[in-house]
Amino acid sequence: MTKSELIAHLAAENPHLRQPDIELIVATIFDEITAALARGDRVELRGFGAFSAKKRDARTGRNPRTGAAVPVAGKAVPYFKPGKELRERVNGGEPQAATRAKVEA
């Protein structure tokens, strides 16, 4: 799903919201996640997963064309760890919270 498909899906599910408002909401959420990762913070969305930035050390790489050694600087890369509920839903099972609610009812 692309960003524009997400916006269209949200607009269809929420006819009381204007399309420009939905675009602003989606852009703001993505911008805040990006800004937090740039600061080195971790972003956790309960039931969905956690975004963090992992550091990669500097290393010596190889130019694939010439085989020459090339220094590669250290950097931070974004990392996503899915939450338990997301993993369960992707694998076709119901999340435990939903299962518990059915048992208790």
Image (spheres, helix red, strand yellow):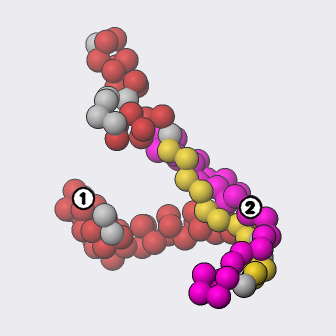
Q: What amino acid type is highlighted by mark number 1?
A: Asn
Q: Quadrant of residue 20?
A: bottom left
For label 1, the residue is 14
Q: Quadrant of residue 91?
A: top left
Q: Which residues are magenta?
A: 41-67
Q: Secondary structure at mark 1?
A: loop
For label 2, the residue is 55
Q: Secondary structure at mark 2?
A: strand
Q: Left of 14 or right of it: where is 28?
A: right
State which tag comes first along the sequence, 1 or 2: 1
Q: Nearer the viewer, mark 1 or mark 2?
A: 2
Q: Left of 4 or right of it: where is 65?
A: right
Residue 11: give x, y in percent of width and height: 25, 65
Q: How far apart in space, not on screen, are marks 1 and 2 (Cα)?
A: 39 Å
Quadrant housing the C terminus: top left
Taking depth in this image into account, of 35 and 49 the one nearest to the observer is 49
Residue 2: give x, y in percent of width and height: 33, 69
Q: Left of 44 or right of it: where is 17?
A: left
Q: Left of 49 or right of it: where is 61?
A: right
What residue is rendered at 78% in x and 70% in y? 59
What residue is rendered at 50% in x and 67% in y? 30
Crowd band around label 1 with a 10 angstrom C-alpha radius: few (<14), some (14–19), many (20+): few
Residue furthest out toward the bottom: 66
Residue 84: give x, y in percent of width and height: 48, 34
What residue is rendered at 40% in x and 24% in y? 96
Q: What amino acid type is highlighted by mark number 2?
A: Lys
Q: Quadrant of residue 1?
A: bottom left
As drawn, 56 above or below 73: above
Crowd band around label 2 with a 10 angstrom C-alpha radius: few (<14), some (14–19), many (20+): few
What residue is rendered at 70% in x and 67% in y? 76
Please indicate, yes or no, whether residue 78 appears anywhere in the rendered image: yes
Residue 6, numbered circle = none
